[in-house]
Image (cartoon, rainbow, N blue to C red):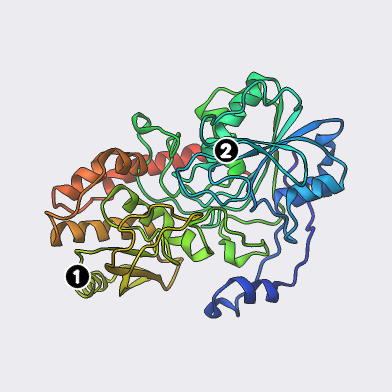
């Protein structure tokens, strides 16, 4: 595709978007007009679907810039949809993290919905028998351990094996496309929550990840891969600076602010400290019953970490059939901090979360426990955990060489 000849497509009422989705302190900022891959598909690339029976990998967040769902738009254009494939959390994004998603038939559309999270994580030959082209349209959150990239990788493999076209509708990296942070995955820790050697915060769009999968990390030279690029997106853009409709991509990524902290505080999933599931602020509330919230907040604020302050809080996780069916410390009061990002451009989510863990290790060496396999899969290395457990401070220079190598390697696969 020619990525340089595209013209701007949509003009939105940016002030309305800003008022509805973003906090008051951001309401005066300029909103950049961006057209995402889903819009560009219909604007100038619809020929890729001509005479094709189509399968769509999507969820409720697969929205065009105007808020319409991709499935509705495809049906309006008389595209022959023969199958829908759902990722973790399901087609309606209403299944808790880690729980299997069941296969079903959409009662309104009469289209089979095949789950790619549960018994099957990869489309089978039988699922693809009535499909000529697979469309992938899922928002990423900019963190390696968010599972949609793994779903895409396995679907790409299936498309290559079964000689199907694979179309990626590109979407923004909500955390911008410039910065990378955190250890690069050691492939010995490769899993569904991180398959490929990239940092925790990787700075790639989902289309760029697809290019690296096909032409760097895997040999997919025979795959009929089509990337539909965005128009007018720039690498320095954050999601709340552009005219793209916010929709929660999964039950615990409730708002844009959650995505900003998620690459760091998701590491708490690999510990016996609550990451805030079962509350209104998952990944922003961090705590446990045995933490002195005032002392913890005081020590953290004394670190003067860039772009963030910490408010002492108490919270009680509750079971939720959608967001958290069995959260840590269900029904038990936890004490800890609210991670309050004051400047997202200065804030370093991974380094911040690691410093939180280091302080907890020093304050509660007999209380803080690591779920070693879980934590190491999330971190992508074992050394991050073992350094914290030793009571030493993490030396980020240890990881910088691998990050620099990744940044250099990714250059030839960047679209923007």
Residue 303 versus residue 131 in the image, above or below = below
Mark seen at residue 243: none
Q: Nearest to the eye among marks 1 and 2: give it.
A: 2
Residue under the image location 70 percent in, 59 percent down? 34
In the picture of the structure, the residue carrying the numbered disc 1 is 292
**Number of numbered markers:** 2
Look at the image and tell me in which quarter the N terminus lies: top right
Residue 352 picture location, percent across and down: 32, 60
Going by the image, does 119 lie left or right of 267? Answer: right
| x then y, percent, for residue 270 | 31, 47
The crowding category of the residue bearing disc 1, from other C-alpha atoms within 10 Å (few below 14, some 14 to 19, many at least 20), is: some
Disc 2 designates what residue? 102
Up-down relation of residue 415 to residue 252 (above or below): above
Residue 126: quadrant of the picture: top right
Residue visible at 56% across and 32% down?
153
Secondary structure at badge 2 equals loop
Q: Is residue 15 above or below residue 389?
A: below
Q: Is residue 398 above or below residue 29?
A: above
Q: In the displayed structure, does residue 372 sit left or right of residue 156?
A: left
Using the rendered view, name the quadrant where residue 82 is placed: top right
Q: Is residue 414 visible?
A: no
The answer to whether any part of residue 411 appears in the image is yes
Of callouts 1 and 2, the N-terminal one = 2
- Give how far apart the Cα atoms at labels 1 and 2 are: 42 Å
Q: Is residue 93 left or right of residue 46?
A: left
Q: Nearer the viewer, residue 88 or 264?
A: 88
SS for callout 1: loop
Q: Rate crowding at label 2 as few (under 14), some (14 to 19) or many (20 or more) other CA atoms within 10 Å.
A: some
Query: Where residue 326 appears, x then y in whole percent?
Result: 38, 52
Q: Residue at x 54, y 53 (%)?
A: 250
Q: Which of the pair 176/99 is nearer the observer?
A: 99
Residue 314 in the image, given as x and y percentages of width and height: 30, 72
């Amino acid at each position: 595709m020619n990525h340089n000849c595209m013209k701007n497509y949509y003009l939105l009422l940016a002030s309305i978007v800003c008022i509805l989705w973003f906090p008051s302190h951001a309401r005066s900022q300029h909103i950049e007009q961006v057209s995402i891959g889903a819009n560009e598909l219909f604007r100038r690339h619809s020929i890729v679907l001509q005479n094709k029976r189509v399968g769509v990998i999507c969820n409720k967040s697969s929205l065009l810039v105007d808020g319409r769902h991709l499935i509705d738009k495809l049906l309006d254009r008389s595209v022959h949809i023969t199958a829908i494939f759902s990722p973790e959390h399901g087609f309606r994004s209403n299944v808790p993290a880690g729980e299997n998603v069941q296969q079903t038939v959409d009662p309104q559309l009469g289209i089979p919905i095949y789950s790619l999270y549960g018994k099957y994580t990869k489309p089978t030959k039988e699922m693809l028998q009535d499909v000529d082209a697979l469309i992938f349209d899922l928002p990423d959150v900019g963190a390696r351990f968010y599972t949609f990239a793994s779903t895409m990788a396995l679907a790409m493999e299936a498309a290559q094996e079964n000689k199907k076209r694979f179309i990626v509708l590109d979407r923004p990296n909500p955390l911008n496309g410039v910065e990378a942070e955190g250890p690069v995955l050691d492939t010995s820790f490769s899993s569904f929550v991180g398959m490929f050697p990239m940092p925790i915060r990787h700075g790639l769009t989902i289309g760029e990840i697809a290019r690296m999968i096909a032409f760097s990390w895997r040999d997919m030279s025979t795959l009929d891969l089509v990337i539909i690029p965005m128009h007018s997106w720039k690498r320095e853009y954050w999601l709340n600076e552009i005219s793209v409709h916010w929709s929660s991509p999964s039950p615990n990524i409730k708002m844009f602010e959650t995505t900003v902290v998620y690459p760091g505080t998701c590491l708490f999933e690999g510990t016996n400290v609550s990451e805030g599931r079962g509350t209104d602020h998952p990944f922003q509330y961090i705590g446990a019953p045995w933490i002195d919230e005032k002392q913890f907040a005081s020590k953290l604020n004394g670190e003067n970490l860039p772009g963030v302050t910490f408010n002492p809080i108490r919270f009680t996780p509750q079971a939720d059939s959608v967001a958290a069916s069995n959260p840590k410390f269900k029904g038990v009061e936890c004490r800890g901090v609210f991670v309050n990002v004051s400047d997202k451009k200065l804030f370093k989510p991974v380094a911040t979360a690691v410093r939180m863990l280091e302080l907890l290790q020093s304050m509660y060496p007999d209380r803080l426990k690591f779920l070693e396999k879980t934590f190491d899969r999330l971190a992508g290395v074992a050394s991050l955990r073992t350094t914290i457990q030793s009571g030493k401070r993490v030396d980020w220079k240890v990881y910088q060489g691998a990050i620099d190598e990744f940044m250099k390697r990714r250059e030839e696969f960047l679209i923007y």
